[in-house]
Image: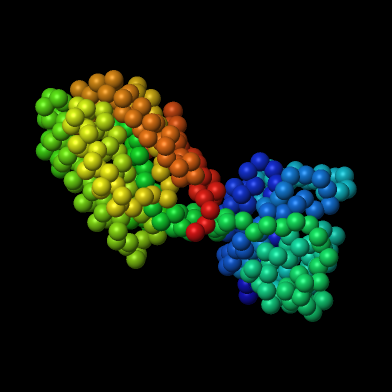
Amino acid sequence: MEGKTAYLSLGSNLGDPLNNLQEALFALQKTAGDIQRISAVYKTEAWGFESDDFMNICIALETDLRPQKLLEQVLKIEKELGRVRFEEEGYQPRCIDIDLLYYGQETFVSDHLVIPHPELPYRKFVLRPLADIAPQYYHPVLNKDTRNLLQECRDKGKLEKTGFRLYKNKEDLFTQTNFIAIEGNIGAGKTTLAHKMAEHYNAKLVLERFADNPFLPKFYEDQSRYAFPLEMSFLADRYQQFTDDTSQYDLFKNFMVSDYDIYKSLIFARITLQQEEFKLYRKLFDLMYKEVKKPKIYVYLYQTTERLLANIKKRGRDYEQNIAPEYLEKINKGYFEFLRGYPEQNKLVIELGELDFVERQDDYEAIIDQIVKFAVHLPFK
């Protein structure tokens, strides 16, 4: 059977409406067809009852499913996302609501499904997002396009276009972030996570070249003697690498992910350097930091000192084995002091706890889901 273009309306006003809509799109893309177009996200008044505002979108879906099968899949997705349909009449709040508006130019009537959707001409919260993706699409019964239906609609409910965008899959969502930095204490797993994300979502990988620093093993043996040359050499190397790597996009990659942000140089320097050394270091750092690219999302992986020490022992780098717990605690404190001043809309702290994203795929996906839920709420630019 030749595929058809179906138009669907999605709405949510319970829990986290933006994330509910995004999860529904992921599920539709995976099980119902290929999403061709997604409207802007609109904030609208509840229609027909008193409740919190809705978030609404419309999509165009290329599908091989016939109308009844598509409806069955839609109802299954609603149920999996927590939708409970009530038997009593009237409208209720809902975590997700998916309506089939059009199915090509076909008309269809059954006990549970009518196409085109009979309420379509009367709902501005449907017609406005539909006009984003199908302004000249003609209603097969009324013989009017979406723009005309919108002009004639008498629905006076308030409707506001938001600055958010939603995506058909995680690859597209991560692509719009441009640059994600994964940070954390020594042994938190930031490099491993960056590697996995780069592999799974076709990202350009930017890794810190810590192993090439000749002062690092000496620093762990005699911190007071080697702290200043270590921090200065780290800063010079990070600045050069970070500037080179983040200023050049790879046309064959979707976005960039790094296992460090250059600000870590200041965090570590504040811990390791004497007061006068740090003042000198800070002047040079401030000049450099103005020039470097800032990540759209800054992810900090928080892990307890006990687990960090276990991870450090497990990976077996000789020069790390004598790292003191107090040093790791100072680093964590330094990061949190930095994060307090970081823009709230761009930082995400993930408490790892017992999560093992190296050995357990479910734990890895749980961390990715946290990043996705955070990214959904970033205004589109």
Residue 81 at what x, y percent from top left?
Answer: 65, 45
Model colouring: rainbow
Tell me if residue 237 can be seen.
yes
Where 159 sits versus 338, above or below? below
Q: Nearer the viewer, residue 36 or 277?
A: 277
Picture quadrant of residue 60: bottom right
Q: Residue furthest bottom?
A: 143
Q: Residue furthest right?
A: 89
Q: Quadrant of the N terminus?
A: bottom right
Picture quadrant of residue 130: bottom right
Would residue 44 be found to the left or right of residue 279 on screen? right
Count of residue discs: 0
Picture quadrant of residue 356: top left
Would residue 218 be found to the left or right of residue 144 on screen? left
Give the residue at x 30% y 55%. 246
Where 323 sits versus 297, above or below? above
Would residue 146 be found to the left or right of residue 339 on screen? right
Residue 315 at what x, y percent from top left?
Answer: 25, 32
Tell me if residue 31 can be seen.
no
Give the residue at x 31% y 41%. 263
Give the residue at x 38% y 25%. 304
Would residue 363 be found to the left or right of residue 143 on screen? left
Where 335 sits versus 201, above or below? above
Residue 320 at what x, y percent from top left?
Answer: 21, 28
Q: Nearer the viewer, residue 117 or 156?
A: 156
Residue 274 at what x, y percent from top left?
Answer: 19, 27
Q: Nearer the viewer, residue 144 or 61?
A: 144
Give the residue at x 44% y 54%. 177
